[in-house]
Image (spheres, rainbow, N blue to C red):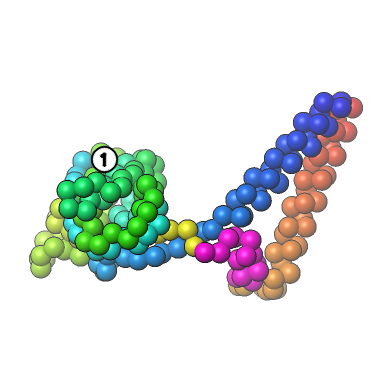
């Protein structure tokens, strides 16, 4: 019985530590873009496609690049960022993402601002139509544009300056909006109910193991 209590306490402690570590990190924020407007559904592809384009300036600290591709079940997407002929950073997003108008691809952190970046996008085989959102490279009315025919919109993300802890009051305020009985107190009620459920479940588990 004592070992069960120790395991339960240890498990709950690890959960609290994990929550604390997560909330101490800063959420990603958009630090820049390549200035391409993301017009929706300008082309489609079944994957196995590759395209390169100018990416403008990558801000220092960029660790995620958000690309204007969407799908119900997205394929693997790989990015390579060059300065001239030199590879600066790269990354990939595994298959399985979807139901979004963009795909976020983590890349190796950029240590300094990069001007006149050149970005290559590679899309793996897809089990569903991949929608290409961006701007056609040339004026055309063709409905069958492929990846190479479109300039993709790209957004460059990096961790913000504030942690989730410092944003807690703002998040709580917005979570409390749009309800029949709105207010920040709803968030504290939810936290209290969740804590009560954890306590009751722990007590029930210990009681059943006696």
Q: Is residue 131 visible?
A: yes
Q: Position of residue 120 (x, y in %)?
A: 22, 50
Look at 26% across and 40% down and name the residue there: 124
Quadrant containing the C terminus is top right
Q: Position of residue 110 (x, y in %)?
A: 36, 53
Residue extent of the magenta highlight: 161-174
| Left or right of 185 on screen, residue 104 | left
In the depicted structure, whether residue 5 falls above or below residue 127: above
**Is residue 91 inside the magenta stretch?**
no
Look at 31% across and 47% down and name the residue there: 89
Q: Place residue 165 in its image quadrant.
A: bottom right
Q: Place residue 48 in its image quadrant.
A: top left
**Which residue is label 1 attached to?**
124
**Is residue 172 inside the magenta stretch?**
yes
Quadrant containing the N terminus is top right
In the depicted structure, whether residue 152 falls above or below residue 90: below
Query: Looking at the image, which is closer to me, 76 or 41?
Result: 76
| Left or right of 111 on screen, residue 79 | left
Query: Looking at the image, which is closer to me, 14 or 188?
Result: 14
Q: Place residue 96 in its image quadrant.
A: top left
How crowded is the residue under tag 1: few (<14 C-alpha within 10 Å), some, or many (20+)?
some
Q: Position of residue 83 (x, y in %)?
A: 22, 53
Query: Looking at the image, which is closer to me, 195 or 51?
Result: 51
Q: Is residue 128 visible?
A: no
Look at 28% across and 59% down and name the residue there: 114
């Amino acid at each position: 019985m004592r070992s069960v209590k120790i395991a339960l306490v240890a498990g709950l402690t690890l959960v609290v530590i994990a929550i604390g570590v997560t909330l101490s990190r800063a959420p990603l924020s958009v630090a820049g873009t390549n200035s391409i407007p993301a017009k929706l559904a300008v082309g489609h592809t079944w994957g196995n496609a590759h395209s390169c384009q100018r990416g403008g300036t990558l801000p220092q600290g960029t660790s995620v690049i958000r690309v204007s591709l969407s799908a119900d079940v997205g394929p693997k997407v790989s990015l390579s960022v060059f300065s001239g002929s030199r590879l600066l950073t790269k990354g990939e997003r595994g298959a399985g993402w979807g139901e979004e108008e963009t795909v976020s691809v983590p890349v190796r952190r950029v240590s300094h601002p990069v001007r006149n970046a050149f970005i290559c996008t590679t899309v793996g085989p897809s089990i569903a139509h991949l929608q290409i959102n961006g701007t056609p490279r040339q004026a055309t009315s063709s409905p069958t544009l492929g990846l190479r025919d479109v300039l993709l919109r790209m957004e460059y993300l990096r961790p913000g300056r504030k942690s989730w802890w410092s944003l807690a009051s703002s998040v709580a305020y917005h979570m409390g909006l749009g309800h029949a009985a709105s207010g920040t107190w709803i968030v504290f009620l939810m936290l209290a109910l969740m804590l009560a459920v954890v306590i009751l479940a722990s007590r029930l588990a210990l009681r059943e193991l006696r």
